[in-house]
Image: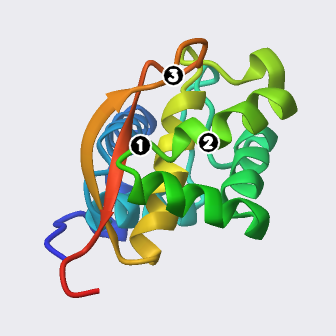
Amino acid sequence: MATLVTPEKIAAMSTEGRAMLYANCMKTVDNEDAIFIVETIVDSGMPYASKKQMSHQDPEMKAIETIVNARANEKAILDAAESDMPPLSVIEPQIVKKLGNLYRAENGGTVVAGYLLAKRLYELDYEKGPAKLMPEGSVARTAATFRKKPGY
């Protein structure tokens, strides 16, 4: 892991600095470093999000996390990844059904869903691929694809 962000550096940041770092890592989530940084910020117990943005302490994020990590959804997520489709495309309807208009791009809901899916797929030895358009009627406009890491 190549990250230079430490718990001490996070503690020394202003709330705004932590919020910006958190938001940037949630958006990019290109690798395990971004996930490590987000988890370090959350574990610090220090404030890190604006009131407008969904964050780890919100019940909406917990609901999305439950859907992403549900055993019943694993096959659909992996099948989407193997078919070069964004895995978000197969679970977003469940998120929308559960959260309604609380799931939207403006509050970071689509970013949260993408982050949690990436985290789950990294744990299963997948790597992020290019973003693709989501199906017509989706809340998210685009979402990442994933592929099994070479050698796995």
- Residue 5 picture location, percent across and down: 24, 63
Which of the two discs, 2 and 3, labels the residue nearer the N terminus?
2
- Residue at mark 3: 135
Secondary element at image label 2: helix
- Could you say where residue 43 lies in the image, as x and y percent from the top left? 56, 66
Q: Name the residue rendered at 45%, 77% in the picture.
A: 124
Amino acid type for the residue under numbered disc 3: Pro
Badges 1 and 2: C-beta atoms under 8 Å apart? yes
Q: Secondary structure at mark 1?
A: loop
Looking at the rendered structure, the secondary structure element under dot 3 is loop
| Res. 81 image quadrant | bottom left
Label 1 sits on what residue type? Met
Q: Quadrant of the N terminus?
A: bottom left
Q: Residue at x 37, y 69 (%)?
A: 7
Counting residues from the N terminus, which is met first, the one under dot 3 or under dot 1? 1
Residue type highlighted by circle 2: Val
Determine whether, in the image, residue 10 is placed left or right of residue 5.
right
Instruction: Please say whether residue 102 is visible from this viewpoint.
Output: yes
Calculate the distance from the C-alpha at mark 2 to the C-alpha at mark 3. 10 Å
Q: Which residue is mark 2?
A: 90
Q: Which numbered marker is on residue 85?
A: 1
Q: Is residue 52 above or below residue 62?
A: above
